[in-house]
Amino acid sequence: MTDNKAAGSGPAENKKQNIEDTANSMPEQPPIGAKTALVAIVGRPSSGKSTFLNTASGEKISIVSPMPQTTRNAVRGIVNTSLGQLVFIDTPGYHDSEKKFNLKLKGITSEQLNTADAVLYIIDATRTPGEEEEMTAELVRPYSAKTVVAVNKIDLKEARPAASRIFIAKQFPSIPASRVIDISAEEDKNINDVLKALYDLSPDGEKMYPEEFYTDQEVDFRIAEIVREQAIMRLRDEIPHAIYVDISDMEWKKPGKELWVRAFLVVERESQKGMVIGKGAAMIKTIRVESIKALRKIFSYRIDLDLQVKVNKNWRQKDPVLAKIFK
Protein backbone atom coordinates (compact mmCIF):
# COMPACT_ATOMS: atom_id res chain seq x y z
CA MET A 1 0.00 0.00 0.00
CA THR A 2 1.08 3.55 -0.59
CA ASP A 3 1.02 6.10 2.21
CA ASN A 4 -1.34 8.94 1.41
CA LYS A 5 1.11 11.27 3.10
CA ALA A 6 4.54 10.10 1.97
CA ALA A 7 5.65 8.72 -1.36
CA GLY A 8 8.33 6.05 -1.69
CA SER A 9 8.74 2.38 -1.01
CA GLY A 10 11.12 0.61 1.33
CA PRO A 11 14.81 -0.12 0.65
CA ALA A 12 15.90 -2.20 -2.31
CA GLU A 13 18.59 -4.29 -0.63
CA ASN A 14 18.14 -8.09 -0.58
CA LYS A 15 17.38 -8.44 3.11
CA LYS A 16 14.91 -5.58 3.15
CA GLN A 17 11.27 -5.86 2.30
CA ASN A 18 9.46 -3.31 0.23
CA ILE A 19 7.97 -1.27 3.07
CA GLU A 20 5.48 1.51 2.45
CA ASP A 21 3.50 3.57 4.92
CA THR A 22 -0.17 2.66 5.32
CA ALA A 23 -2.99 5.06 4.55
CA ASN A 24 -5.12 7.29 6.70
CA SER A 25 -8.02 9.09 5.11
CA MET A 26 -7.40 12.79 4.49
CA PRO A 27 -10.02 15.56 4.68
CA GLU A 28 -11.16 16.87 1.33
CA GLN A 29 -8.92 19.68 0.10
CA PRO A 30 -9.54 22.45 -2.46
CA PRO A 31 -8.20 21.71 -5.95
CA ILE A 32 -4.49 22.32 -6.51
CA GLY A 33 -3.72 25.28 -8.75
CA ALA A 34 -1.94 25.23 -12.10
CA LYS A 35 1.54 26.30 -10.94
CA THR A 36 4.23 23.65 -10.50
CA ALA A 37 7.87 24.15 -9.56
CA LEU A 38 10.92 22.40 -8.14
CA VAL A 39 12.39 24.75 -5.53
CA ALA A 40 15.95 24.46 -4.16
CA ILE A 41 16.42 25.81 -0.61
CA VAL A 42 19.94 27.18 -0.15
CA GLY A 43 21.74 28.84 2.73
CA ARG A 44 24.58 28.61 5.21
CA PRO A 45 24.56 25.76 7.72
CA SER A 46 21.92 26.22 10.44
CA SER A 47 20.25 29.17 8.69
CA GLY A 48 16.84 27.55 9.14
CA LYS A 49 16.35 25.71 5.84
CA SER A 50 15.07 22.50 7.40
CA THR A 51 12.78 24.40 9.80
CA PHE A 52 11.31 26.31 6.86
CA LEU A 53 10.66 23.08 4.96
CA ASN A 54 8.97 21.45 7.94
CA THR A 55 6.84 24.53 8.63
CA ALA A 56 5.83 25.08 5.01
CA SER A 57 4.85 21.45 4.46
CA GLY A 58 3.11 21.12 7.81
CA GLU A 59 4.97 17.84 8.42
CA LYS A 60 8.40 16.77 9.68
CA ILE A 61 10.42 16.30 6.49
CA SER A 62 13.96 17.31 7.40
CA ILE A 63 15.80 16.90 10.69
CA VAL A 64 16.59 20.05 12.66
CA SER A 65 19.57 20.70 14.91
CA PRO A 66 21.75 23.63 15.99
CA MET A 67 24.69 21.64 14.63
CA PRO A 68 25.90 22.86 11.19
CA GLN A 69 25.44 20.57 8.19
CA THR A 70 22.72 18.45 9.79
CA THR A 71 21.14 17.96 6.36
CA ARG A 72 23.26 15.72 4.11
CA ASN A 73 20.89 14.77 1.28
CA ALA A 74 18.68 16.76 -1.04
CA VAL A 75 15.45 16.20 0.88
CA ARG A 76 12.13 16.68 -0.89
CA GLY A 77 9.05 18.19 0.73
CA ILE A 78 5.83 18.91 -1.14
CA VAL A 79 3.45 21.85 -0.60
CA ASN A 80 0.06 21.77 -2.33
CA THR A 81 -2.23 24.82 -2.30
CA SER A 82 -4.92 26.41 -4.44
CA LEU A 83 -2.10 28.16 -6.33
CA GLY A 84 -0.26 24.97 -7.29
CA GLN A 85 2.40 22.49 -6.19
CA LEU A 86 5.87 23.40 -4.91
CA VAL A 87 8.36 20.56 -4.50
CA PHE A 88 11.09 21.77 -2.15
CA ILE A 89 14.60 20.34 -2.01
CA ASP A 90 16.33 21.01 1.31
CA THR A 91 19.98 21.07 0.29
CA PRO A 92 22.94 20.74 2.71
CA GLY A 93 24.17 23.98 4.22
CA TYR A 94 26.88 25.47 1.99
CA HIS A 95 30.26 25.26 3.72
CA ASP A 96 33.64 25.99 2.13
CA SER A 97 35.94 22.99 2.60
CA GLU A 98 37.98 20.71 0.38
CA LYS A 99 37.42 17.59 2.50
CA LYS A 100 35.84 14.74 0.53
CA PHE A 101 32.75 14.72 2.76
CA ASN A 102 32.15 18.47 2.35
CA LEU A 103 32.81 18.33 -1.39
CA LYS A 104 29.97 15.81 -1.65
CA LEU A 105 27.68 18.23 0.20
CA LYS A 106 28.64 21.11 -2.10
CA GLY A 107 28.07 18.93 -5.14
CA ILE A 108 24.51 18.18 -4.03
CA THR A 109 23.77 21.90 -3.58
CA SER A 110 25.21 22.90 -6.97
CA GLU A 111 23.32 20.16 -8.81
CA GLN A 112 20.01 21.15 -7.27
CA LEU A 113 20.49 24.83 -8.17
CA ASN A 114 21.01 23.86 -11.79
CA THR A 115 17.88 21.73 -12.03
CA ALA A 116 15.47 23.82 -9.93
CA ASP A 117 12.70 25.98 -11.39
CA ALA A 118 13.09 28.42 -8.49
CA VAL A 119 15.53 29.05 -5.63
CA LEU A 120 14.82 30.03 -2.03
CA TYR A 121 17.91 31.58 -0.43
CA ILE A 122 17.59 31.70 3.37
CA ILE A 123 19.83 34.04 5.33
CA ASP A 124 20.13 34.06 9.12
CA ALA A 125 19.39 37.57 10.40
CA THR A 126 21.14 36.85 13.71
CA ARG A 127 24.56 36.45 12.05
CA THR A 128 26.54 39.26 10.47
CA PRO A 129 27.19 38.35 6.82
CA GLY A 130 30.82 37.37 6.37
CA GLU A 131 33.05 35.46 3.98
CA GLU A 132 31.02 32.25 4.07
CA GLU A 133 27.77 34.14 3.41
CA GLU A 134 29.46 35.90 0.50
CA MET A 135 30.47 32.52 -0.96
CA THR A 136 26.89 31.29 -0.61
CA ALA A 137 25.61 34.41 -2.34
CA GLU A 138 28.14 33.91 -5.13
CA LEU A 139 26.81 30.39 -5.61
CA VAL A 140 23.22 31.66 -5.90
CA ARG A 141 23.85 34.87 -7.89
CA PRO A 142 23.70 33.29 -11.39
CA TYR A 143 20.14 32.24 -10.55
CA SER A 144 18.95 35.68 -9.37
CA ALA A 145 16.11 35.77 -11.89
CA LYS A 146 14.48 32.77 -10.23
CA THR A 147 15.44 33.50 -6.59
CA VAL A 148 13.39 34.54 -3.55
CA VAL A 149 15.32 35.58 -0.42
CA ALA A 150 13.99 34.86 3.07
CA VAL A 151 15.60 36.78 5.94
CA ASN A 152 15.04 34.30 8.75
CA LYS A 153 14.94 34.30 12.57
CA ILE A 154 13.44 37.79 12.89
CA ASP A 155 11.66 36.56 16.04
CA LEU A 156 14.97 36.51 17.92
CA LYS A 157 16.09 39.64 19.80
CA GLU A 158 19.59 39.46 18.29
CA ALA A 159 18.21 39.55 14.74
CA ARG A 160 19.40 42.39 12.50
CA PRO A 161 17.23 42.04 9.36
CA ALA A 162 18.20 45.50 8.09
CA ALA A 163 21.87 44.43 7.87
CA SER A 164 20.84 41.29 6.01
CA ARG A 165 18.79 43.35 3.55
CA ILE A 166 21.73 45.67 2.88
CA PHE A 167 23.88 42.62 2.16
CA ILE A 168 21.26 41.15 -0.18
CA ALA A 169 20.82 44.46 -2.06
CA LYS A 170 24.58 44.61 -2.63
CA GLN A 171 24.96 40.97 -3.65
CA PHE A 172 21.77 40.72 -5.71
CA PRO A 173 20.98 44.13 -7.24
CA SER A 174 18.57 42.58 -9.75
CA ILE A 175 16.31 40.98 -7.11
CA PRO A 176 13.42 43.35 -6.30
CA ALA A 177 12.60 44.19 -2.69
CA SER A 178 9.28 42.37 -3.09
CA ARG A 179 11.22 39.10 -3.33
CA VAL A 180 13.21 39.75 -0.12
CA ILE A 181 10.95 38.75 2.77
CA ASP A 182 11.51 38.85 6.53
CA ILE A 183 10.37 35.58 8.12
CA SER A 184 10.44 33.40 11.19
CA ALA A 185 10.39 29.78 10.08
CA GLU A 186 10.18 28.71 13.73
CA GLU A 187 7.14 30.91 14.45
CA ASP A 188 5.49 30.44 11.01
CA LYS A 189 5.66 34.17 10.30
CA ASN A 190 5.36 35.35 6.66
CA ILE A 191 5.83 31.81 5.32
CA ASN A 192 2.79 32.27 3.07
CA ASP A 193 4.38 35.43 1.62
CA VAL A 194 7.41 33.38 0.63
CA LEU A 195 5.22 30.70 -0.95
CA LYS A 196 3.30 33.36 -2.91
CA ALA A 197 6.55 34.86 -4.23
CA LEU A 198 7.73 31.40 -5.32
CA TYR A 199 4.42 30.68 -7.04
CA ASP A 200 4.83 33.97 -8.94
CA LEU A 201 8.08 32.57 -10.38
CA SER A 202 6.61 29.15 -11.13
CA PRO A 203 5.42 27.98 -14.55
CA ASP A 204 2.15 26.22 -15.21
CA GLY A 205 2.69 22.51 -15.53
CA GLU A 206 1.71 18.96 -14.72
CA LYS A 207 1.96 18.03 -11.05
CA MET A 208 5.01 16.00 -10.05
CA TYR A 209 3.21 14.16 -7.22
CA PRO A 210 -0.35 13.30 -6.21
CA GLU A 211 -1.85 16.00 -4.00
CA GLU A 212 -1.93 13.81 -0.87
CA PHE A 213 1.88 13.42 -0.78
CA TYR A 214 4.02 15.64 1.43
CA THR A 215 7.38 13.90 0.75
CA ASP A 216 8.91 11.31 -1.58
CA GLN A 217 11.39 10.02 1.00
CA GLU A 218 11.56 6.27 1.44
CA VAL A 219 10.63 4.77 4.79
CA ASP A 220 14.15 3.56 5.65
CA PHE A 221 15.62 7.00 4.93
CA ARG A 222 13.07 8.73 7.15
CA ILE A 223 13.72 6.33 10.03
CA ALA A 224 17.49 6.75 9.67
CA GLU A 225 17.19 10.54 9.70
CA ILE A 226 15.07 10.56 12.86
CA VAL A 227 17.57 8.31 14.65
CA ARG A 228 20.45 10.52 13.50
CA GLU A 229 18.61 13.63 14.71
CA GLN A 230 18.14 12.14 18.17
CA ALA A 231 21.84 11.21 18.30
CA ILE A 232 22.93 14.68 17.22
CA MET A 233 20.79 16.29 19.92
CA ARG A 234 22.48 14.28 22.68
CA LEU A 235 26.15 13.93 21.75
CA ARG A 236 29.01 16.37 22.13
CA ASP A 237 29.97 18.69 19.29
CA GLU A 238 32.69 16.67 17.55
CA ILE A 239 30.70 13.44 17.26
CA PRO A 240 27.59 14.20 15.12
CA HIS A 241 29.47 14.63 11.84
CA ALA A 242 31.23 11.32 12.48
CA ILE A 243 27.89 9.46 12.67
CA TYR A 244 25.66 7.93 10.05
CA VAL A 245 22.76 5.50 10.44
CA ASP A 246 22.67 2.20 8.60
CA ILE A 247 19.27 0.50 8.35
CA SER A 248 20.33 -3.12 7.97
CA ASP A 249 16.95 -4.85 8.03
CA MET A 250 13.20 -4.18 8.17
CA GLU A 251 10.38 -6.68 8.58
CA TRP A 252 6.66 -6.50 9.22
CA LYS A 253 5.79 -8.18 12.54
CA LYS A 254 2.13 -7.27 12.10
CA PRO A 255 1.45 -6.12 8.51
CA GLY A 256 0.34 -2.51 8.48
CA LYS A 257 0.54 -2.31 12.29
CA GLU A 258 4.08 -3.03 13.53
CA LEU A 259 7.38 -2.72 11.65
CA TRP A 260 10.58 -4.16 13.13
CA VAL A 261 13.75 -2.24 12.21
CA ARG A 262 17.40 -3.04 12.93
CA ALA A 263 19.57 0.08 12.73
CA PHE A 264 23.22 0.81 13.47
CA LEU A 265 24.67 4.13 14.57
CA VAL A 266 28.02 4.01 12.76
CA VAL A 267 31.00 5.97 14.10
CA GLU A 268 34.62 6.33 12.98
CA ARG A 269 36.53 5.35 16.13
CA GLU A 270 36.23 2.95 19.06
CA SER A 271 36.40 5.87 21.49
CA GLN A 272 33.31 7.37 19.84
CA LYS A 273 31.47 4.05 20.17
CA GLY A 274 31.78 4.24 23.94
CA MET A 275 30.40 7.79 23.96
CA VAL A 276 27.37 6.76 21.90
CA ILE A 277 26.64 3.75 24.12
CA GLY A 278 27.14 5.74 27.32
CA LYS A 279 27.58 4.59 30.89
CA GLY A 280 25.48 1.52 31.50
CA ALA A 281 24.19 1.87 27.91
CA ALA A 282 22.20 4.92 29.06
CA MET A 283 22.89 7.05 25.97
CA ILE A 284 21.98 4.45 23.33
CA LYS A 285 18.82 3.57 25.30
CA THR A 286 17.79 7.24 25.37
CA ILE A 287 18.41 7.68 21.65
CA ARG A 288 16.33 4.56 20.94
CA VAL A 289 13.40 5.58 23.15
CA GLU A 290 13.28 9.17 21.87
CA SER A 291 13.57 7.97 18.25
CA ILE A 292 10.56 5.68 18.74
CA LYS A 293 8.58 8.59 20.22
CA ALA A 294 9.43 10.81 17.25
CA LEU A 295 8.60 8.07 14.74
CA ARG A 296 5.14 7.62 16.29
CA LYS A 297 4.33 11.18 15.24
CA ILE A 298 5.23 10.41 11.62
CA PHE A 299 4.03 6.90 10.86
CA SER A 300 0.57 5.43 11.35
CA TYR A 301 2.06 2.12 12.53
CA ARG A 302 4.34 1.15 15.41
CA ILE A 303 8.11 1.06 14.87
CA ASP A 304 9.99 -1.56 16.92
CA LEU A 305 13.58 -0.29 16.80
CA ASP A 306 16.60 -2.49 17.48
CA LEU A 307 19.40 0.10 17.74
CA GLN A 308 23.10 -0.82 17.99
CA VAL A 309 26.49 0.88 17.50
CA LYS A 310 29.40 -0.18 15.29
CA VAL A 311 32.68 1.29 14.03
CA ASN A 312 33.60 1.93 10.39
CA LYS A 313 37.03 3.56 10.62
CA ASN A 314 37.38 6.84 8.71
CA TRP A 315 34.10 6.27 6.84
CA ARG A 316 33.94 9.92 5.72
CA GLN A 317 36.89 9.26 3.40
CA LYS A 318 35.43 6.08 1.85
CA ASP A 319 33.70 6.53 -1.49
CA PRO A 320 31.40 3.47 -1.19
CA VAL A 321 30.05 4.72 2.15
CA LEU A 322 29.61 8.28 0.87
CA ALA A 323 27.81 6.96 -2.21
CA LYS A 324 25.38 5.10 0.04
CA ILE A 325 24.76 8.07 2.34
CA PHE A 326 24.34 10.60 -0.47
CA LYS A 327 22.25 8.36 -2.71
Image: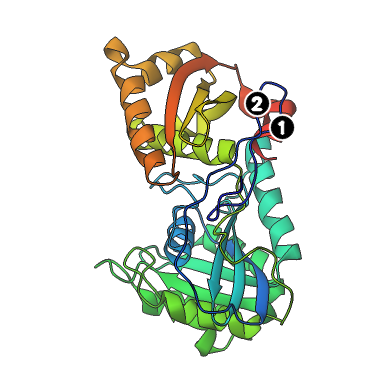
Q: Are marks 2 and 1 in contact (CB under 8 Å)?
A: yes
Question: Which residue lies at the image location 38% right of the left edge and 40% below the top edge?
Answer: 296
Question: Which residue lies at the image location 75% right of the left edge and 64% below the top edge?
Answer: 114
Tell me which amino acid carries mark 2: Lys
Seen as rendered, the residue at the extreme left is 157
Nearest the camera: 239 or 84? 84
Q: Secondary structure at mark 1?
A: loop
Q: Is residue 207 left or right of residue 171?
A: right
* Colour setup of the view: rainbow
| The label number, if any, that marks residue 16 in the structure image | 2
Distance between the alpha carbons at the discs numbered 2 and 1? 6 Å
Q: Is residue 242 above or below residue 277?
A: below
Q: Is residue 112 above or below residue 108?
A: below
Q: Is residue 56 left or right of residue 87?
A: left
Question: Which residue lies at the image location 71% right of the left edge and 82% below the top edge?
Answer: 204
Nearest the camera: 53 or 17? 17
Tell me which amino acid carries mark 1: Ala
Q: Is residue 106 above or below residue 152?
A: above
Quarter the C terminus occupies: top right
Q: Secondary structure at mark 2?
A: loop
Q: Which residue is mark 1?
A: 12
Nearest the camera: 49 or 151? 49
Crowding at dot 2, Cα within 10 Å, few <14 / some 14-19 / many 20+, comes out as: some
Is residue 200 in sight in this rendering?
Answer: yes
Q: Quadrant of residue 292?
A: top left
Q: Give coordinates of residue 33: x percent, y percent.
A: 61, 81
Nearest the camera: 281 or 84? 84
Q: Give coordinates of residue 24: x percent, y percent.
A: 47, 53
Q: Give coordinates of residue 7: x percent, y percent.
A: 61, 51
